[in-house]
């Protein structure tokens, strides 16, 4: 195999979940963020990713755990194929499964402290859950495998006492800029506009944002626009309309950034999710 291959699907049995199975040889993900959590395991090979100030290795038997807003990368470790299975659950789904798995214990925020955990038994369960949803028409089997595996992940590797509310973050220039970007990501944004919104110079905006989040404000805007594009594509919106709604200059502009950050072209993504 010389080319990358990517399959994406939405397990019908569990609302609020997207699944992916990819075989990467050449894909290199630049720094970006997700609006949902990412749970990743490898069937074969290994990959490395930058997250929270360090580079982490994910080998078979390990689980990668990325929180919403975590700036991260991703690439194969060495020349070996990276055979990856991932889940993208919404926060509401994780809260629901946590409460079910802990007999109603509430959780103010979903936050994994460790970007990588070694848990071969659970990694195998997540791989099997992905395989089941990919290959079977048995709704009960798929739902059972997914709920059991993700609930076990929360119970074993998450604790409400370690979770922090995002509102407790210091109101630095970088965080003010990030908040502004989230509120206006689909609109035209300039450095001048960001600087005026937070009351500092343009160079200060770039310097503070890059120091705090490891990427330039423009790169962050693009990741949010691609995330919104994914949502619209899942809703069966035409690609031309998606590009326009998400602030891209044209459809090829959307295609270039979508392929770079998601690992699959928007047209292929749309076809994979078609009923």
Image (spheres, helix red, strand yellow):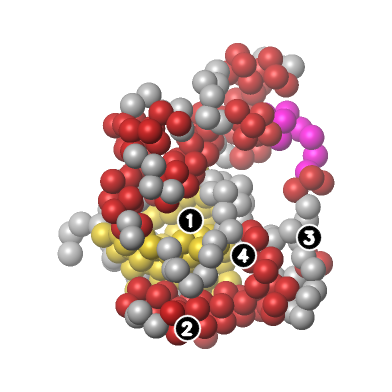
Q: Is 241 or 27 nearer to us in this picture?
A: 241
Q: Is residue 53 among what the camera can see?
A: no
**Residue that numbered label 1 is attached to:** 49
Which residue: 36% across, 66% down?
Answer: 21
> What's drawn in magenta, residue-wise?
169-177
Mark 1–mark 3 CB contact (< 8 Å)? no
Distance of mark 1 from mark 3, alpha carbons?
27 Å
**Residue that numbered label 4 is attached to:** 93
Marks 1 and 3, the one that precedes in the sequence? 1
Marks 4 and 3, the one that precedes in the sequence? 4
Which residue: 82% across, 46% down?
Answer: 168
Distance of mark 4 from mark 3, alpha carbons?
13 Å
Q: Position of residue 270 (x, y in %)?
A: 33, 50
Marks 2 and 3, the one that precedes in the sequence? 3
Q: Is 57 or 249 nearer to us in this picture?
A: 249
The circle on residue 140 is 2
Q: Is residue 227 above or below residue 23?
A: above
Residue 234 colored in magenta in the image: no
Q: Position of residue 39 (x, y in %)?
A: 52, 65
Q: Is 14 or 275 nearer to us in this picture?
A: 275
Q: Residue 240 is drawn in which quadrant?
A: top left
In this view, the mark in front (1 or 2): 2
């Amino acid at each position: 195999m010389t080319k990358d291959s990517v399959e994406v699907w939405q397990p019908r049995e569990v609302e609020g979940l997207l699944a992916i199975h990819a075989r990467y040889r050449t894909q290199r993900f630049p720094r970006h963020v997700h609006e949902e959590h990412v749970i990743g395991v490898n069937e074969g090979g290994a990959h490395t990713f930058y997250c929270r100030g360090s580079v982490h290795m994910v080998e078979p038997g390990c689980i990668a755990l990325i929180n919403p807003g975590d700036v991260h990368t991703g690439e194969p470790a060495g020349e070996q194929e990276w055979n990856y299975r991932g889940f993208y659950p919404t926060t509401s789904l994780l809260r629901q499964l946590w409460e079910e798995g802990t007999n109603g214990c509430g959780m103010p925020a979903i936050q994994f402290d460790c970007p990588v955990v070694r848990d071969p038994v659970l990694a195998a369960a997540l791989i099997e859950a992905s395989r089941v949803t990919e290959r079977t028409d048995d709704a009960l089997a798929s739902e059972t495998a997914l709920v059991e595996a993700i609930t076990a992940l929360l119970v074993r590797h998450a604790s409400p006492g370690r979770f922090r509310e995002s509102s407790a973050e210091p109101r630095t220039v970088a965080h003010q800029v990030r908040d502004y970007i989230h509120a206006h990501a689909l609109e035209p944004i300039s450095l001048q506009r960001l600087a005026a919104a937070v009351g500092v110079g343009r160079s200060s905006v770039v310097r503070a944002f890059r120091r705090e989040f490891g990427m330039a404000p423009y790169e962050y805007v693009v990741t949010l626009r691609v995330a919104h594009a994914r949502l619209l594509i899942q809703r069966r919106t035409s690609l031309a309309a998606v590009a326009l709604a998400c602030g891209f200059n044209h459809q090829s502009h959307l295609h270039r950034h979508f392929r770079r950050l998601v690992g699959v072209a928007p047209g292929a993504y749309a076809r994979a999710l078609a009923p």
